[in-house]
Amino acid sequence: MSVIFILVGFSLLVALFFLGSFIWAIKDGQYEDDYTPSIRMLFDDEPHETPPSPKEDYKNKSSINNSNN
Amino acid sequence: MAETNTHPAQTSPGNVEHFEYDNDIVRKFIIASMVFGIVGMLVGLTAALQLAFPVLNADLAWMTFGRIRPLHTNAVIFAFVGNGIFAGVYYSMPRLLKTPMWSKAFSNINFWGWQAIIAAAAITLPLGLTTSKEYAELEWPIDIAIALIWVVFGVNMIMTIVKRRERHMYVAIWFYLATFITVALLHIVNSMEMPVSMMKSYSVYAGVQDALVQWWYGHNAVAFFLTTPYLGLMYYFVPKAARRPVYSYRLSIVHFWALIFLYIWAGPHHLLYTALPDWAQTLGTAFSVMLIFPSWGGMINGLLTLRGAWDRVRTEPVLKFFVIAITAYGMSTFEGPMLSIKSLNAIAHYTDWIPAHVHVGALGWNGFLTFGMFYWLVPKMWNTKLWSDKLANIHFWIGTLGLLFWTIPMYWAGWVQASMWKQFTDEGMLAYPNFLQTVTVLAPLYKLRALGGLLFFTGVLLAAWNLWKTGVQGTLTKYEAASAPALPETYTKHSSDHWHRWIERKPVQFMIWTFVAVAIGGAIEMLPTFLIKSNVPTIASVQPYTPLEIEGRDLYIREGCVGCHSQMIRPFRSEVVRYDPNGMEYSKAGEFVYDHPFLWGSKRTGPDLHRLGGKYSDDWHYTHMYDPETTSPNSIMPRYPWIIQDDLDTGDLEAKISALRTVGVPYPEGYETQALADLQKQAAGISKSLKSKGIDCPQEREIIALIAYLQRLGTDIHKK
């Protein structure tokens, strides 16, 4: 049954990887950033009526975020 | 163009590129999905009616329940839902990525290849050409075709991502990618089989190992064919139809990762209390229970997307369908973790509860999401309004009623049957020792279920009519013009970027990570069982099947007996007393080491057969197979007159022996030459035993081989 230790080891490794990524993500401020894609997709198939959203411009957006920070 | 001016040019040099979305391929997939939906559900309705009225098996080999059940499951999963996935992906992906699908040729190979596979399934399954592994019944040449066409789909998708004009990969794309990668892996691993002839093969895995691989596949087929792609579709079509953004984009990302990492581990919950090693069972349970979090994350995210739009749910058929679909998803993903808990699983497993659970997901989640998606897509693509909102509303209500009439009687049936199986009298005897008592009591419930199926099926016909009329009244934009600025070549990383953006920008990296996640999960679960001998204790008295028994076993596989009969006695008093009253042995892992494939089954419409050997006489089996009602009044089993009348084809016997030896069954070298003689000798014995009971049956008949196999079942463990 020594295999159970390998199992737990791998599980923990995976779980820790995600926990770490998640904490880092919150600290990195993905809150502010992860809204625009959900808006942008609403206009993705109306190219003639709606101009390409300015929100897809990352550089521009990033600088706004920076000024907020 | 005017748009160019409104678009800030900081990152883009302003090169607006013009291109076309291919709506024609979407149209093809929609039509295929609806056509095969109707066919698949009609077959399902027939199967449901056969359980209520066995006469509908019609004494026709290709019409019997055992053969059309896999036809139904394959048709609705891979033809109806499969084409629905392709339709949704081929519509949403180019728009999300602002580029046409990478290759029109690949799109068309994907379409026609998939339909050819479906046609092959529709021909081979009724003919009894099956591997018998659930949702993986198709034989090896078709398996190879599936792998190839699936890769065509994947390459087309990945190259589209590479060529995209939108840097960010919307969450739906992730779900599509995870679907492709995981299904490819699952399909390949589970379809490892040793060919005997063009249309016959044996699984390379045996017994417990085969069971674990099969349910690792089976469970994840549900996860990555019926769930993740549909979550992707939900994240595209629900916000579109509701005309508002998804409730929480971040939740969608978190629940995506959680889902793919947890789902892959949950497979063993299909094998609780079986001969699978205990630790693997516990692992499956633990991960299944955890799965409720990402699953409900998706459900909540979907339903809350409708916040502020609930008034429109009253009037818009599309939203109605979506609400029921997401609710059904929530219910079945609550039920799933609950059913993975051993004490509840002990009751539900092998009963009609499981089909009920499956159909909440299949009819509700997959069915209603598909219909909602098509009701939204067809008017949009054909530049018109839905032909009749009223008809769609009728479809909605009749479909919802059908769902309820299908599932509630089957939940009821599950409880009734499980209770009767486990009931003991005060004297300590089984209260219902005759299994048939626990079947005939379900007859009214089976009729109600068939009514539910009929209602749902009627709704689908209405949908097909409505969508057809919508298409006729509108004009399809075959190729929809679009434009977007080219993606800048370089990308400068910024300190405030998403943590996960590096992965979104690089589909290849993303793929590798998903693959690693999935491979780790799979390997941890499977490798130990392969590598560690102690998991599969060998029982000295367990011997390989004789040539005649192999042929009999292949008949058992051909007729789909495994669809209604398990071969796995769980370690419960109620089961041991019922199925092995003399020997009192439950099923042990070591008894299945020569079973290529395993035939544990997943449903007991009839009794378990693992200790059938020696229980009845040869002539009982002969009479029973000819007409079950003569030995078991009111039995709902089909008649098998052709097995009595047809001669056994032993043409592949030598190839079968070699193939089985290759996958590890210890037949001596050169046994092929002796196999036929051994077969004839054993057959003569059974023919003689039948003759002594006044049954004149030549030894060449198929029934002789089947009797040989059935009389061998589960007897080795009692040999001294």
Image (cartoon, coloured by chain):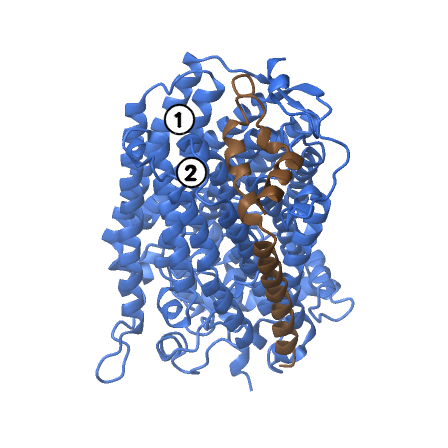
Chain colours: A brown, B blue
Location of residue B292 (image quadrant): bottom left
Outermost residue, left direction? Answer: B426
Outermost residue, bottom direction? Answer: B720
Query: Is residue B58 in view?
Result: no
Q: Residue at 47% of width from left, 63% of height from top?
A: B290
Location of residue B13 (image quadrant): top right
For the residue labelled by badge 1, is the local secondary structure a helix, a strand or a loop?
helix
The three-letter amino acid code for the residue at tag 2 is Leu
Q: Are marks 1 and 2 in contact (CB under 8 Å)?
A: no
- Tell whether B284 sits left or right of B450: right
Mark 2 crowdedness (10 Å alpha carbons): few <14, some 14-19, many ≥20: many
Q: Chain of mark 1?
A: B
Q: Position of residue B668 (x, y in %)?
A: 75, 71
Q: Chain of mark 2?
A: B
Is residue B371 depicted above or below B276 in this figure?
A: above
Q: Nearer the viewer, residue B121 or B342?
A: B342
Tell me the tag on residue B217: none
Query: Is residue B468 in view?
Result: yes
Image quadrant holding the N terminus of chain B, namely top right
- Tell whether B3 sits left or right of B289: right
Is residue B278 depicted above or below B222 in this figure?
A: below
- Circles 1 and 2 on the same chain: yes
Q: Position of residue B124 (x, y in %)?
A: 56, 42
Q: Residue at 74% of width from left, 63% of height from top?
A: B662
Mark 1 or mark 2, which is nearer to you? 2
Q: Which residue is mark 1?
A: B464
Q: Residue at 50% of width from left, 46% of height from top?
A: B226
Q: Which residue is mark 2?
A: B369
The three-letter amino acid code for the residue at tag 1 is Ala
Q: Position of residue B655 (x, y in %)?
A: 71, 56
Whichever of labels 1 and 2 marks the residue nearer the N terminus, that label is 2
Is residue B646 depicted above or below B576 in this figure?
A: above
